[in-house]
Structure formats: structure tokens, C-alpha cells
Amino acid sequence: AETFVVGSKSFTAVAINTAAKAGQWIKTKLGDINHVGTKYSAQDLVTEVDKGSEKLIRNLIMTHFPNHSILGEEGVEPGPEASAKALQEMSDEEYLWIVDPIDGTTNFVHGFPFFSVSIALAHKGEVIVGVVYDPSRDELFVAEKGKGAYMHGKKTEVSEEETLLTSLIATGFPADRDGALPINMKGVQALSPKVRNIRVAGSAALHLAYVAAGRLSGFWEIGLNAWDIAAGALLITESGGRVTDTEGKLYHLGVRNVMATNGRIHEELQNELAVAEATGYVK
Ligand code: IPD
Ligand code: CA
Ligand code: CA
Ligand code: CA
């Protein structure tokens, strides 16, 4: 059970190769996008490159593991209800790959070089492999349950800040302008005076990878989906950090309101977010 190998192919090797291939392909499409469409709202974008990346990822995973299931963002109807339902329907699968083919589509559309490919593998609902790849910087973050997390062969570790006052925190401005965004903004308002600073760079998965690598002290966002969080969550716990929902409950695949930190500032962040009423987004 410790080796995660089927035949001769390791799950982790397939996750790494797949994320790297998809990321490299996406990069060749920067500035060469033919169609920008919208999904759930005017701010919720999708391009043919999102769909092409997901297809490439599905094909590669299916080649190696034809019996596994795949939950990918572009294979699900838009909106929080449909994505929660899709996850629920698949959560009993023995092996479930959870895929965000481009995390940070808005950045990708504008040529802002902060987007990623996020691939996780869950075994009976527990994430056992997580890979986040940033093609702009050619940085690949990988974690295996119980075996640590690495970036290009070097172990990643969360940062050492003990207080919010010395912390660099990231969040996201969700595309769901009526539901998640206003709640998240309350958190921004409450935290701004308490922290060193806040960053909103536009890829949840990459923000989580940065928490794992100690480049950010923490991250929170309201209204995310499983594919935004699953890989990054394992990167963080395997780097010594902590991942919960905004109410402090341990991370699981259904968490949408995520709070992820170096562990040391977790309670303080949770208290400040609760003050901001940044909890309770269930939609
Ligand atoms: C989005 C990004 C963004 C976050 C949004 C996500 P997408 O994912 O992670 O940073 O603020 O909530 O939906 O749509 O670019 O894959
Ligand atoms: Ca999207
Ligand atoms: Ca995403
Ligand atoms: Ca996406």
C-alpha cells in the first residue's frame, strides 16, 4: 500500500509527466487563444486551451490507468451546485484523479504569467498524490502522502512566521460575484491591518504551492472547488503546514472555503476571518 504502483508505472510519475506535458503545451498557446467564452458569470472564463489541456490530461491518465475515474473542471457543468454534485457522485471511486487543466484562466487570457496545472489522485477519498506545475517559471511541486513534498528534488517546507503581523497572506477574488466574493472581501478588510501584506495573484493552486514552499505564510479563499485545492492541500501538509476549512475543520475533498497556513498562524488567521464573518459559504 505504500508504493502506489500499478504494474510498473507509479501514480506519481504519471501525475508529474502529465502535468508537465499539459503545462508545456499551455505555454505554447500563450497569446494564441482563439476563443474566450464565459461560463457561470461574465467573469468566469474558459478557452479552447482549458478544454484542450483537460483532454490531453484525460488521455494520458487513461492510457496508464484505464480503470481510474477523473473529475476535471471542464467536464463538469459550471457553477457551485453542479461541481458539488459531480464530486459527490464520484467520491466513492477507489481511485479518483482530480484535475484543474488551467488554474488561473483569467491570467492566462491576459498573459499574466501566474497560472498552473493541478493534478491530484485520491484513494477512497484521501489525496495520496498532488502535483502543481507552473509552466511560466518551470516549477513543479510534487507531494506523496507520507513521503514529503518536493520542488525539483528539494524538499519544500512551510515558512516560520509566528504572527499575522509578520505574515504574507494570499487570497483570491472568486468569479462568483454574488456569493463567494463579498464574503471573501470582508476577510480582506478585516485582515489588511493585521498582516504584513496580502497578495491576490489569481491561481489558487499556485498560491497553495507557495504556502508549501514557504513563499507565503498562508492562503484562504471562499467558494473554491475540489480541483483548485486537492493537490495544493497535500503539498502543504507534506511540507509541515495545516489545511482546514475556514471554521477549522480538517481538509477533505468537499471543502470549498479553504484556509491553509504554515500551521503557526493558523488559529490567529481563523480568528480574524471569523471576525469578518468569512465563514458559512455553503452554496
Ligand atoms: C480560479 C483561480 C482563481 C480563484 C478562483 C478560481 P480557474 O480557477 O484559482 O485564483 O480566485 O476562485 O475559480 O477558473 O482559473 O481554474
Ligand atoms: Ca474556471
Ligand atoms: Ca481553478
Ligand atoms: Ca481551471
Image (cartoon, rainbow, N blue to C red):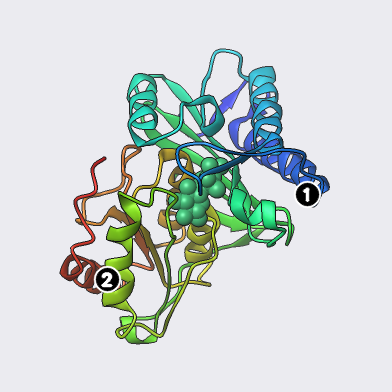
Q: How crowded is mark 2: few (under 14 residues within 10 Å), some or many (20 or more)?
A: many
Q: Mark 1 points at which residue?
A: 27
Decide which of 182, 51 is in the foreground and name it.
182
Q: Where is residue 197 in the image (x, y as percent from the top left)?
A: 43, 81
| Mark sitting earlier along the chain (1/2) | 1
Identified at 23% across, 61% down, the residue is 278
Q: Where is residue 24 in the image (x, y as percent from the top left)?
A: 78, 45
Q: Quadrant of residue 101?
A: top right
Instruction: Specify the amino acid type for callout 1.
Output: Lys
Left/right placement of residue 210 relative to residue 259 reads: right
- Cβ at disc 1 under 8 Å from ligand 4: no
Q: Where is residue 89 in the image (x, y as percent from the top left)?
A: 35, 19
Q: Position of residue 118 (x, y in %)?
A: 57, 44
Decide which of 201, 18 is in the foreground and name it.
201
Instruction: Specify the amino acid type for callout 2.
Output: Leu
Q: Can residue 7 be seen in this view?
A: no
Q: Which secondary structure, mark 1? A: helix
Left/right placement of residue 249 relative to residue 206 reads: left
Total label count?
A: 2
Q: Which secondary structure, mark 2? A: helix
Identified at 37% across, 26% down, the residue is 124
- The answer to whether residue 225 is above or below residue 208 is above
- Looking at the rendered structure, which numbered label has been put on residue 269? 2
Nearest-to-viewer mark from 1 and 2:
1
Left/right placement of residue 214 relative to residue 112 reads: left
Decide which of 58, 85 is in the foreground and name it.
85
User: In the orientation shown, which residue stands out farthest toward the front?
Assistant: 42
